[in-house]
Image (cartoon, grey):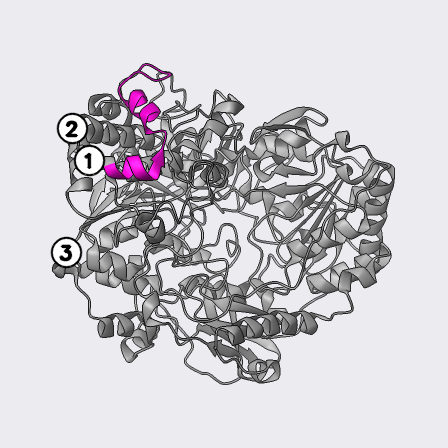
Amino acid sequence: MSTKNSWSPSLSRRRFLTSSASLAALGAAGSVLPGGVTRAFAADKSKEVLSASHWGAFYGKVEDGRFVSLRPWDKDPFPNQAVHGVQDVVYNAGRIKYPMVRRAYLEKGPNAERDSRGAGDFVRVSWDQALDLVAKEIQRLQKDEGPWAIYSGTYGWQSSGRANNSQAMLKKLMNLSGGAVFSTGDYSKGALAGIMPYIMGQIDAEGPQTSYLSILENTDQIVFWACDPWKNNRIAYSPPDHGEHLFFDELKKNKMKKLFINPLRGELCKATDGEWIAARPHADIPLALGICHTLLSEDIYDKDFIENYTFGFEEFAEYLKGNGWDKIEKTPEWAAEQCEVPADKIRELARSFVAGRTMLVSGWTPQRQHHGEQWPWMFITMACMVGQIGLPGGGFCQRYHLDNPGAPQSNGPALGSSVNPGKRAENKEWPEEKGAKTIPCARIVDMLENPGKPFEHNGETHLYPDVKMTYWTGGNPFHHHQDRNRMRAAWKKFDTVVIQDFQWTATARFADIVLPATTTAERNDIDRIGSVANKAILRMAKIIDPVFEARNDYDIFTDLAGRLGVQDKFTEGKSEQDMIKEIYEQAREMAAKKSVEMPDFDTFWEKGIVEFEVPEENLRRVRYADFREDPLMNMMPTATGKIEIFSKYIEKMNYDDCPPHPSWIEPAEWLGMEDKTYPVHLSSNHPDWRMHSQLCSTKVREIYAVAGREPCLINTEDAAERGIKDGDIVRVFNGRGQILAGAKVSDDIRRSVIQVQEGAWYDPEDVSDPNTLCKYGDPNVLTLDIGTSRLAQATSAHTCMVQFEKYTGEVPEVTAFVAPAAAQ
């Protein structure tokens, strides 16, 4: 073990396991966040209710039945300032107050014209009238056309809580009543999830990773490639524990080398005084190939690891030497031309990776691009050549940017869900060839444009179904899908659009029937703190009664189930509280098997939280240590039992857009193109202060908005060339669309790259114009909508070239965050 990074067990436990006075001080009023943002938390604890969100656990303060403020949980070591939006979202001007129906649809039903979607011409109706309309349309389509006519849009990061899972509820209702088309995969890591089963036999980027303590004690160099864990760990699907910032504090003081390969210099790079290598976007694979070529040509790669733990290296080695399918030798000089990192620097990187213990850390950005499957494969192949997989503090990780996965796990039980969507009942009257039961989630527009036509996915061919209706809950497709104007045109294919939500997102505005749901503050639920750390199980108690005419998702679906004749099967005789208790009791049974005591449900519900201890043996977890120790007894779940650098399964698919070993295939758009009509790369990565599009409508926007719009980060020299200064409004455009954004000029982004973060709400100036200006700054107006390859068919959102200029026209008012006039 390296003595220079040694950590005493007692110190590690104090840093990672306790809530000492120093940690509590991090949540004190007046403490400062990166960028100079000051926390201002309420000190009065009277009439407070403990609950949680994607931004962390908190106490909600209630006065006269109104949710007036909140403060973070006192054991959160690094509270997220954005959590205050959880209170603001309840009452702000974007709240959906009542059931609403688009006027044209109310008059003519599914035969209504579709051009007025998005114009805000809604009529308030009763709950009974709204649910009757929804049930009637579901019954009509399931009876007349079969389950292929309904697309159950249940993708997205819904609200926290395990009982009120609106997406699972909708799937269950559809399966019980006659079926629908669902989606598979996700926008976050779709390409990675598609390729990893062939490389490692599993989706590696999930669950616990090599522990932070193992890194601090053993690592000589840590390489953060296209990720910023400081920023992204602010949020999580389960309420985050934010313990990773204790690791970041120690990383600052640790003498290991910190290297950041990224077009942007992120917060962690600055906080740890790391070395920034501003590589060209989309050229990560050429850079890695140049490193691998050096390892091979200088004979410094780990031959033992390659021989005993991997399969197919010979084919990849020939590819590096120029004997592969493209006949190009992947020398550092060749790589330098693609990635704009000097050849000597590439050689230096390769030598440094094997000179000591190296942890390679990747984000998911490089796999959200054209041919995105190739990056995880290339990244792991590079790690195999370095040969430190399964060693303390070495190897690779593809998840440190989310869910605090380096945290030591507690001895607490897992927490499940009470809603089982079940399976669609087969109806012999409907032939299967009418269409696929599921489509890759990122191919929704392709499905709408090509009903009945074939598409390839993961080695199989399917038919796109002819959908006529969509019902969407717990998500916002007018945020997360690409090429907004193309999507708007395809959206008109739907006869009926039903949206169930609590905010007037663009998706709700482009609906026919809008059903107002409650926020988490208006219902009971249960969740855990820390997806990996599993620090505690928390009662998410109802803070206030539902406001306006909002209803719980469970109540909405129960009433719909009654209209569809399946209410008893849907509820299974359970109330919302029954479901919460069932989830808790299942966890309590698992805890008992581990000799971990948990109180009975009533005691838990009264107290509000059950916290767990962290066993000493969990502090120094090493991912793939068992595989490293004995690759025969602990084989990978692949065809060969090894890490597959070459896949015979993918070879049989014969996809020209996904070769059988990691490869460089030039993307459809990138800075290395010879013909660049639009000369600037658009980075639309994860936002600093939101959770995708959630909370964009709240006062949290005051932290980051520029000129009332989404910030556009611009390199200082690029801005000067265009006469742009901080605070100016810029127009960003390409052949797909145009947006306005607020200029933020900085040296923390390389030239010819701008950043407009995803999740900005779509705000079209004129819904009758197919190429209308987005007034607020939704980057997906500009992004490319093509599949990564025929293997994963995932999003290529980061494959996007644009131009930008100072906006000199009349500045239109942003209206995205206020409900349509008829709904106010």
Q: Is residue 275 visible?
A: yes
Closer to the camera in the image, 307 or 820: 307
**Residue at 29%, 80% in the rendered image:** 21
Q: Comparing marks 2 and 1, which lies closer to the viewer?
A: 2
The reply, left or right, for residue 749 in relation to residue 366 is: left
Q: Residues within 10 Å of mark 1 (few under 14, many from 20)?
A: many
Amino acid type at image mark 3: Lys
Residue 255: image tag:
3
Closer to the camera in the image, 619 or 276: 619
**Residue that carries the numbered disc 2 in the rendered image:** 298
How far across and how far down the image is residue 576, in percent?
A: 69, 70
- Numbered disc 2: secondary structure: loop
Determine the CA span between mark 2 and mark 1.
10 Å
- Position of 360 relative to 385 (above/below): below
Amino acid type at image mark 2: Glu
How far across and how far down the image is residue 112, in percent?
A: 81, 37
Q: Earlier in the sequence, mark 2 or mark 1?
A: 2
Q: Quadrant of residue 29?
A: bottom left
Amino acid type at image mark 1: Ala
For residue 324: magenta?
yes
Query: Answer yes or no: do the residues labelled 2 and 1 have beta carbons within 8 Å?
Result: yes
Which residues make up the magenta segment?
A: 304-327
The reply, left or right, for residue 517 in relation to residue 19 is: right
- Position of 22 relative to 403 (above/below): below
Determine the CA span between mark 1 and mark 3.
20 Å
How far across and how far down the image is residue 205, in percent?
A: 42, 48
Determine the CA span between mark 2 and mark 3.
28 Å
Q: Quadrant of the C terminus?
A: bottom right
